[in-house]
Amino acid sequence: MDSGSSADWSRLDRVLQKATDTFRLAAVEEDFQMVGLLCREAFISLAQTIYDGSRHQTVDGVVPSITDSKRMLEAFFAVDLPGASNEASRRHARAAVSLADSLVHRRIASYRDAALCLEATTSTVNLAFILTGRAEKERILPVVVEPFRIPELHDPILEKVVEHYKAQGEEPVLRLFESRDVRLAEGYRLAYYPGTRREGWAGYHAGRYEHLLMLKPRG
């Protein structure tokens, strides 16, 4: 477990990306529960990366197991975010871990449940990135940037975004989420909402967004 500059963040990055991809395609209760499971795994990976037993004394004095993310993260934030002024941040981290555990066992899990869990997980991870110096060292974007959602395919906002890219000589198109990886491999690019790094999601139907705004390959 290493919270220094040599820390290996790769497992955490992979599981967070998997949680994000699962959330994007989630349609039924079991899918939403899987988001919770992946968020819980993300917390375990985060804890194993940043917890240092020589620095981080657990609150109850119990030596945590290698999967006891709750104790490890609580100890980390108690040391790296000390004092009454940081209690809100510490409380947020504790609640995020509990939220993931709760979602895993919620048989009637919903889109909102999964969205709240993923958001809480991501923000807690970003706190750790700031405290360990990763955010500054790598100049990374937040792990998850909230997409720009456009429920209707004929929404004027979507039309304005399309016109924005056409004015730049690009050819924006809507593609099904299921073809995302294939399209990226073919040279398509994500069409972010202008001025941001927010993906453009469109066409809400049957509990999920079906389309992703992309740019056709040039040439």
Image: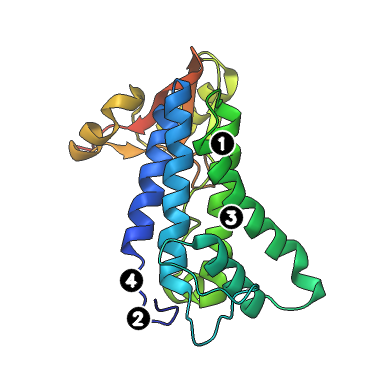
Q: Nearer the viewer, residue 156 or 129?
A: 129
Q: Which mark is residue 99?
A: none
Does the rendering let one see residue 92? yes
207 and 211: which is toward the camera: 207
* Residue nearest the observer in this picture, 187 or 88: 88
Q: Is residue 50 above or below residue 13?
A: below
Q: Which residue is mark 1?
A: 115
Q: Which mark is residue 123?
A: 3
Q: Amino acid at mark 1?
A: Ala
Q: Secondary structure at mark 3?
A: helix
Q: Which residue appears at 55% of the width and 27% of the height?
A: 109
Residue 215 coordinates in the image, percent (x, y): 33, 34
Mark 4 or mark 1, earlier in chain: 4
Of helix, strand and loop, which one carries label 1?
helix
Q: Callout 4: 10 Å neighbours few (<14), some, many (20+)?
A: some
* Residue topped by disc 2: 6
Query: How far apart in space, not on screen, are marks 2 and 4 (Cα)?
Result: 6 Å
Labelled pair 2, 4 in contact (Cβ < 8 Å) = yes
The crowd level at tag 1 (other Cα within 10 Å; few <14, some 14-19, many 20+) is: some
The answer to whether residue 167 is visible is no
Query: Would you say the residues marked 2 and 3 are in contact, meaning their CB atoms lie under 8 Å apart?
Result: no
- Mark 3–mark 1 distance (CA, rounded to whole Å): 12 Å
Distance (Cα) linking label 4 and label 1: 27 Å
Q: Residue 38: x percent and y percent?
A: 42, 45
N-terminal-most mark, 2 or 3: 2
Residue at (35, 26) in percent of width and height: 177
> Does the CB distance between marks 2 and 1 fall below 8 Å?
no
Measure the C-alpha gap from mark 4 to mark 3. 19 Å
